[in-house]
Image (tube, rainbow, N blue to C red):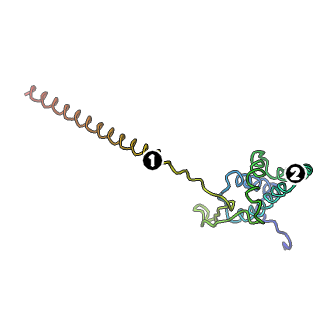
Amino acid sequence: MRHKNNVKQLGKTSAHRKAMFGNIATSLFLHERIITTKQKGKELKRISEKLITRAKNNLSLGQEEGAKKLHNKREVMKFIKNRDVVKKLFENIAPRFKERPGGYTRLYLLGRRPGDAAEMAMVELVDFKKEVVAPKKDEKKADKKSKALAKKGKEKVKEEKSEKKEEKKAKTKKETEKAD
């Protein structure tokens, strides 16, 4: 019986599980949104929230407590091997959640995967905003002008092709008349 065993094994050895969740957590912090299976997503939520909390604890520490800050970073780096991602976690992600008392990630269920019917889920950071760059008015006008020019160019090409076809027809008629 598995009483008081809170680890979801997911059919993997402990070393494989640790490496897999380290990689998935790295991807989550790098891209701020990932798609995975439902069970891995649930476990990833637990792990990533602990890492964010650890990074948030560094914000409240002062300059004189540099050893504690270093300890927190090293504890996170045991799990996330990419230094750039750790830097992003401590400098960008943790300050965004400074006032939030927990619940930093969200899990959306996406349905079943076509190949093996595994339940899929999307895990994202709560404050994730997809950056949509709207074109400026000047760019819209430029796009319209370029499209109009492209249409005119296409029309000219069509006219030239039709003229060439007519010339070929005229040549073939002359050749057939001469042959007669």
- 150 w.r.t. 134: above or below: above
Image check: 98 left or right of 167? right
Q: Residues within 10 Å of mark 2 (few under 14, many from 20)?
A: many
Front position in the image: 18 or 104: 104
Where residue 132 sits in the image (x, y, percent)? 56, 53
The residue at 74%/66% (across/down) is: 103
Q: Which mark is residue 53?
A: none
Q: Are marks 2 and 1 in contact (CB under 8 Å)?
A: no
The tag earlier along the polypeptide, 2 or 1, is: 2
Residue type at the position of mark 1: Lys
Where residue 138 sits in the image (x, y, percent)? 46, 45
Q: Residues within 10 Å of mark 1 (few under 14, many from 20)?
A: few
Q: Nearer the viewer, mark 2 or mark 1?
A: 1
- Describe the element under mark 2 as helix, strand or loop: helix
Where residue 71 sits in the image (x, y, percent)? 89, 51
For the N terminus, give its image quadrant.
bottom right
- Describe the element under mark 1 as helix, strand or loop: helix
Residue type at the position of mark 2: Lys
- Count of labels shown? 2
Residue labelled with disc 1: 140
Image check: 38 left or right of 79? left
Residue labelled with disc 2: 69
The residue at 28%/39% (across/down) is: 158
Front position in the image: 70 or 64: 64
**Extreme residue in the front direction:** 137
The residue at 70%/51% (across/down) is: 30
Where residue 43 sits in the image (x, y, percent)? 75, 64
Front position in the image: 85 or 176: 85
**Extreme residue in the top direction:** 178
For the C terminus, give its image quadrant.
top left
Image check: 77 left or right of 173? right
Give how far apart the Cα atoms at labels 2 and 1 are.
49 Å
